[in-house]
Amino acid sequence: MNRSSPPVDPSWTSRRRLLTALGSGTPDRVPINTYELAGRNRLDWYNQQPSYHRLMEFIRTHTDCITNWNPRAATDRYTCEERFLASDFPVSIDTHTDMAGQFQRVTRICHTPKGDLRSIKQRAAEAHTTWQVEHWCKDLEDVDKALSVPYQPADYDASDLARVRAELGENGLILASIGDPAYLAADLMSFQDFLMWAFEATDHFARTVDLLAERVLENLRRQLDCCVVDCYRIVGPEYFTPPYLPPSMFRRFVVPHVTAMTRLIHSRNGKVRLHCHGKIGRVLDWILDTGCNGIDPCEPPPDGDIELDEVKRRCQARGVSVWGNLELKLLENGTPDQVRAEIQKVMGQAKDGGGFVLMPTAAPISVPLSPATEANYRAFIEAGLEFGRY
């Protein structure tokens, strides 16, 4: 560390610190989390990359960990993201893998009762991400084909949870991620086609969302029956924020279903963090109406449309914690001095009164990790420790 830190009270473990902030309380200092760079899970992708080893060790030593983990479907026919329309029905899917230039491309053909659908994804060896080249559905007829696949609820396997908990200990929390029903519908199509579907065939879109909502809630209920982790991140509402769609569609398609999911999670003593990128200013009150315990990543203008101090004021009045809002583009393209100045500004906007977790808005996806990005991550963590004490 470049600057000395005050003595640490050992009773303030990372787990206690994060839970206190998530509950809108005031811990010993602002928790510092590095988003998807999860230092306490040896199977995490970042912990497998040699160029990240030094940074990950620094993260393990000086930050408050969130381990991202979901129970797998017991049948293991699909990965979590590949389960077709939230159904575990054994639909026939043919898979073909080839190379397209530098990309590994995977083509899938799904044989539904009403006809075939095709999706194509690709990835590059030097990036930890997947690009969707072609979505399952290109028109409403394709959507109806997708919906013709019968629904079979998933059974879940939490056998890996003991390992995850043992590795994490008191050093943080376990976070599961779940897509909301409207997002699952939207993701059937390319973003442009989804917007036209929602605008021009709104009733058809609404029926699709309602059907998926039944499946999502049943799968969530079964997942909670299998195990309950510390917090659940609900993802997808950003698809329905301005300028893409009017706030009325956010209220119609997101709020009721996310509220139902949140209530179910709360009934099992879990917590909810709602993940919504982009311009949330005009829908923030509806986000808070869902009953979530926290929101992220609260991007500053111009990527967002509301300053962090205003987000904090409105969330604090409703007992909702705020997670963010250090942008990845600063960590990848700025300097340590710029990062330090930004952390000082962020703390001034959101630290007072507790209920705030310092966190980047995204995570790097490239290998090898650049020395500049590593230096900026260190500057962010050091500044968080320096300026974050209460």
Image (cartoon, grey):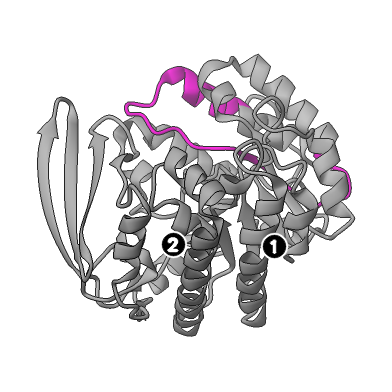
Visible residue check, residue 126: yes
Residue 190 as seen in the image, left or right of residue 231: left
- Look at 45% across and 58% down and name the residue there: 184
Q: Is residue 244 magenta?
A: no
Q: Secondary structure at mark 1?
A: helix
- Look at 35% across and 50% down and name the residue there: 139
| The C terminus - image quarter | top right
Visible residue check, residue 171: no
Which amino acid type is marked by label 2? Trp
**Location of residue 376 with respect to 267 vertically, above or below:** above
**Location of residue 108 with respect to 351 vertically, above or below:** below
Front residue (pair 181, 290): 181
* Residue at numbered disc 2: 69
**Location of residue 65 with respect to 32 vertically, above or below:** below
Which amino acid type is marked by label 1? Leu
- Look at 85% across and 59% down and name the residue there: 318
Q: Earlier in the sequence, mark 1 or mark 2?
A: 1
* Span highlighted in magenta in the image: 350-379
Query: How packed is label 2: few (under 14 Cα within 10 Å), some, or many (20 or more)?
Result: some
Query: Do tag 1 and tag 2 residues touch (Cβ < 8 Å)?
Result: no
Residue 190 as seen in the image, left or right of residue 234: left
* Residue at numbered disc 1: 19
Q: Residue 383 shows which numbered tag?
A: none
Q: CA distance from mark 1 to mark 2?
A: 17 Å
